[in-house]
Amino acid sequence: MNIKACYYLPSIFCLLAFSALPALAQIIPDNTLGAENSRTITDTINGKASQRIEGGAIRNSHLFHSFQEFNVGEGQGAYFTNPTNITNIFTRITGGNPSNISGTLGVLGNANLYLLNPKGIVFGSNAQLDVRGSFLASTADSVVFDNGFAFSATNPQAPPLLAINIPIGLQFRENSGSITNQSQFSRIVPTISPFTPTAVGLEVPFGQTLALVGGDLNLNSGNLTAFQGNILLGSVASPGFVSFGLTPFGLTLDYTAVPNFGNIELSGIASVNTSGLGSGSISVKGGNVTLRDRANFISDTISTIDGRDINIQATQFNLLDQAFIESGTLGTGAAGNVNINATDSINFRGIGFATLRRIIFDEPFSGIVNPFPRDSGIYTSTVGAGKGGNININTRQLTLNEGTLINSPTYSVGAGGNIAIQASESVELTGSGFYAGSLAQGNGGNIVIDTNKLMIRNGGLLTTAISGQGKGGDVIVRATDSVVLTATPEFSTFSTALSTNSILGTGDVGNIDINTRTLLVEGGASITSTSGLTSGNRLFPSASRGGDIIINASESVKIAGKATGNTPSEIRAAQTFVVSGAVGSGDGGDVTINTKRLLLEDRAALGASTLGSGAGGDIVVNAAESVEIIGSNDNFSTSGIATASGNQLYGLAFQLDPPTGSAGNLSITTPTLSLKEGGTVSVGTLGSGNAGTLKVVANAIALDNKSAIEGTTVSGAGANVNLQAQSILLRRGSRISTDAGTSDGGNITLNSDILVAFPQENSDITANARTARGGRVTVNVPNIFGLTAISREEVRDRLGLTEEQFAALQVSPTSLLPTSDIAAISQTSGPALQGTVTFSASGTNPAQGLVELPQNVVDPSTLIAANPCNQGASNEFTITGRGGVPPSPNDALGNTSAQFAWVEGSLEQESRGSKNKPLSLSPQAEVIPARGWMMNNKGEVTLLAYQPVGQKGQRFWQPLSVSSPPLRPEK
């Protein structure tokens, strides 16, 4: 098929100089075709000294040629004549030497050309094709036809005179030769800068097929071009059969009958290009397939025709040192997909983390739009109305290192492509990333990863982002064993991250869905879904709604600011955190975590926040075993779970305008909630928005060493804290609070069996306010120890402050007292501004019934006598009653001890062999409780069944027939 068109093609290639092969002009026919032998005639064709090849055996629409040697020197040509009605020309080389093509190989007609040399084929740096049909070069032994005839180069025979209809495949024997292409042939192609391909190398016309099928394939600075056509690369390492197939788009190859495959390597800016009005296809099949040193596959669509796919099948696939694969669209036609299947592993390696940072962050933030960065990675961009191509990867191990990127963005109205990864063992991103973004009206694609283990480290990135009207794609991770994010690079502005974000966009941000056994986020890494972005001292607001984060980890979730064996994370905008946030008018998304154990430590954060007018999202934590938060207790940020309106989650080094959005709610359900070393669980707002509600349902809640469960408010409605547990313990300066600024203090409700604090450890429960009304503390707890309810006046007096000094305090007044207190006060005087502390009817007022323990502790060693015998001589132990206890501690228990009078021996005891008889129980007399006591006429205390009255109404007494024993028995 011939198509003439003028269009631009997105390719930029640098030309490298190579030493030219010696000039060769050896085209020597053999005698295997008899009277139909091939013939060569010296001629000048297209201005070149050439060999015109005639003769050959014609069978139906096929022409067969056979040569002992076939070489074309540099600057020379070899052209096959094309008799009428001939559609395929088959050429074999039987002499046992490789063929060197350094000049022009062509056909004087429209026939397809097949070149067969089992010993190898080399295309030099100035080699070129001048054909109007397709071209196939192979080191197979023979071409096999449907009638069983094999046109063989190792067992050459003339084709039979009977009809030969259809070639069905290539038969390979042992030790097939290699194919090398170094062609950098250049020609002028109509272009629109900057997409200017100049070095086309070996080229077939529009819509045609170019195939290299042999042993090892080496494209060392050699290019292959089939605009809008097909390029097929195959490497066969053992005897086998490669089947031909025909589709409306041209030739296809089937390797089902090939057991082993060889190596395919592209290097030195080698390029394979099938771009066009609708992109063509690139199909690669080999053992180890490697692209290195800026080598590339390019298949771009520039008009209305849908593009076709790039398909790579290998045992191992390597993309190294700025090599890349590109399948984009600049028109209304959809881009083709990139499909890579490697049974063992896929490895990407760039030239450094700076490349990733430049493409993802530096250029977009500087206003530079580069849809085709052509750096280390895979790119399926759309710059038109056409949909971007999908990227599908299937392997055992996938590894991306040193700044490589798998990228499917949209820069226009077309939807971005999806990224789907299936790696049965592991996926590792080290300073590299997956990116599916929308920078315009089109919706961004999704990223889906199915694997056993996912590792993102050293600035690695897994993200969908938007900066336009389009909706962001989702990130879905299904890792049967583990997900690990760790080790943000030192001094990096951006963290190792799994994220869905909006930067100056208006479309909704995508969601994050993680399903795994264990999740570890450490060393400054983050999982975020944010509307808007903060970077250093820069703020990028957005009107988008933040996405939701859903984490299901059957075993555990750990968020830690310190990677094992490494130094702690830097204190900067992005500490280690899992955050859903809003920076601007968009609402933040929700965070849901379902796991067995949740652990936050070393300045880790789990949050949902807003920095603008949008509402913050909610947080829901369900932990079947425990939630543990271990802070740092330093002067910097600490570990915590929080919903917030303001920058308290971000630790920004610059001031923001007070946000107006409300904070979300926070809910934790777990058997054990433990906060240590300054760990926090909080809801709050730094602006005019309302603080959220914090609810915890647990068996045990424990706060230790300045830890806090709190709700904070500046000017919005106060926070509410609701704790429901069997026990609540506060130690060493910990607190439960809903303090406020110019708004009313929030409310605290405690429902528990026991509430414990140490009186002198300054652990407080407060709902205070600075200038407004104090909140309400409701304590539904029957057993309270160590806490004292305290009024405003008591706090002020104990601090020794005047009214003015007390009102001017910038911290909670009760925090300045050494005692553990419960308070709901306002720093501003006036009964109407004071809050309330309420205890339920079944509860105990901590101001009553508490026993003050002595401060002087007795040394137990002083209670032990140096001579216990002398100590015992002055003591006395007397028993009233009969049996069971010796009369004196110094007497042994003998067998003459008296029986209790109310115990009768049974006959069964005398005869051990007798059967047990039913025990007959007589009804007991009614027990009458004692209601009082009196002295009888002997001066003894006697218990009474009624309450005695005073002297005026004194009853007449008669001695009781049964009286209680005296306090001290008579001797």
Image (cartoon, rainbow, N blue to C red):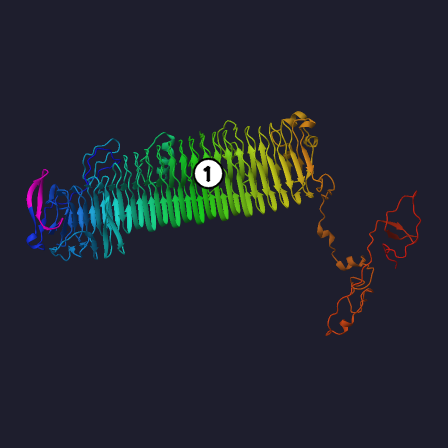
Query: Image check: 957 left or right of 236?
Result: right
* Image location of residue 77, percent across then percent down: 11, 42
* Image location of residue 383, percent across then percent down: 32, 33
Label 1 neighbour load within 10 Å: few <14, some 14-19, many 20+: many
Give the answer, above or below, for where 256 lies relative to 510. Answer: below
Q: Is the C terminus in the top left, top right, bottom left or bottom right quadrant?
A: bottom right
Region in magenta: 41-62
Secondary structure mostly seen in the magenta stretch: strand
Query: Image check: 706 left or right of 494?
Result: right
* Closer-to-camera residue (293/620): 620
Residue occupied by mark 1: 528
Query: Image check: 591 left or right of 357?
Result: right
* Image location of residue 530, percent across then percent down: 46, 35
Give the answer, above or below, for where 292 lies relative to 807. Answer: below
- Inspect the magenta stretch and tell me whether residue 44 lies in it: yes
The reply to whether residue 56 is visible in this rendering is yes
Q: Is the N terminus in the top left, top right, bottom left or bottom right quadrant?
A: top left
* Closer-to-camera residue (879/829): 829
Which residue type does callout 1 highlight?
Answer: Thr
The reply to whether residue 261 is visible in this rendering is no
* Closer-to-camera residue (525/377): 377
Mark count? 1
* Image location of residue 727, percent across then percent down: 64, 45
- Inspect the magenta stretch and tell me whether residue 152 lies in it: no
Give the answer, above or below, for where 534 lies relative to 483. Answer: above
* Displayed quadrant of residue 418: top left
* Displayed quadrant of residue 846: top right
Residue at position x 9%, y 42% from top?
A: 50
